[in-house]
Amino acid sequence: MPNLLSVQEVDVTSFNELCNSAEAYRTGVPETTPIDTTQQGGLLFFESSTRTRIGFGTAAWQLGVRTVSIYETKVNENMSAAESLPDTIRTLNPYVTFFCIRHPNEGVFDEVVPYTSHPVINAGNGSREHPTQALIDGYTLQHRFGRLEGLSITMLGALRYSRAARSLLKLLAKFNGVNVTGFTEPQLNFTEAEVAAFTKNGNTYQATDNHAWGSEQVVYSAGFPPVTPAGKFSQEVRNRYAITLRTVNRMNEGAIILNPLPRIDEVSKEVDDTPQAHYFAQNELGLFMRKAILARYALKP
Ligand code: CP
């Protein structure tokens, strides 16, 4: 079975099939192909996670498959020396039938893939990629609008350092007529190469640090970590890109606000009760997409 290391590996046909499969799980369509429930997943999280870790554990459990997990252990502390990742993979390889891995190093899969023949799912590697989150975000758009083509999306926050935003831009690049506005500080915008890849087939991208709200259908709040490799940003700067009730009042009335969560202060809590707030619905859809991802990439019938 194939690995899922980058959302680049997911073409439009596969994305549509994943969305259909997620919809079947959401609406309770019975399985046509039973899953071999003797399989077992290894969830290896070397960085904190609530949604992705618990989400894949729950998705596997609902599909009748067990998981074992490592959570934020040896790379950090409590051992005289950290075990190498290849040794961890080689140790667990006989016990599991697939891996789901989050790690702070962008190049982590070079240390994983050579040591296992099992499918590997990327649950987030540094600030580079978060393909399963992008699939959840894409499914949320498909669920809400029935399409990704032609959507007008404002993305804000530390885009350059948000693996969720970077993977979503890569996924959106596969569709036509998508219009993205990057609303952030110039040094936190996507890279020129990322923008060029997104626009090469006719999508449009504009960057601004002074956004005129009103025409967007989707507002993607990517978050704003207190420290990034570009430096530390003041609360004043963070506030400039936070979504408040005042922002919501200036948005297109039918717009939806997405956020991969966790939400820190990039969307104020008073926004939660507005019709535009869609981030907890997005999180709810995540379980069905994670089941679809496991069924497609990790589990044999
Ligand atoms: N969206 C997301 O990746 O959340 P977690 O960090 O809680 O997994």
Image (cartoon, rainbow, N blue to C red):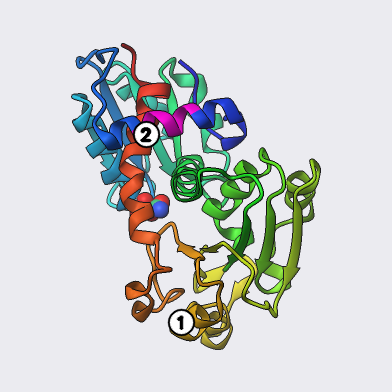
Query: In terms of depth relative to the viewer, which is nearer, 30 or 269?
Result: 30
Secondary element under disc 2, as helix, strand or loop, is helix
Answer with left or right where residue 8 lies relative to residue 112.
Answer: right
Disc 1 designates what residue? 244
- What residue is rendered at 60% in x and 42% in y? 171
- What residue is rendered at 68% in x and 43% in y? 173
Q: Is residue 180 magenta?
A: no
Quadrant placement of the N terminus: top left
- Whole-percent x and y of residue 255? 51, 65
- What residue is rendered at 33% in x and 59% in y? 280
- Whole-percent x and y of residue 188? 66, 67
Tag 1: amino acid: Thr
- What residue is rendered at 68% in x and 78% in y? 212
For label 2, count other residues whose C-alpha is less than 10 Å away and answer few (under 14), some (14-19) or many (20+): many
- Mark 2 and mark 1 lie on one chain; the one further toward the N terminus is 2
Task: Tell me which segment is drawn in magenta.
Answer: 17-23
- Report if the beta carbon of the residue with label 1 is closer than 8 angstroms to ligand 1: no
Q: Is residue 76 visible?
A: no
Disc 2 designates what residue? 22
Secondary element under disc 1, as helix, strand or loop, is loop
As drawn, 225 above or below 281: below
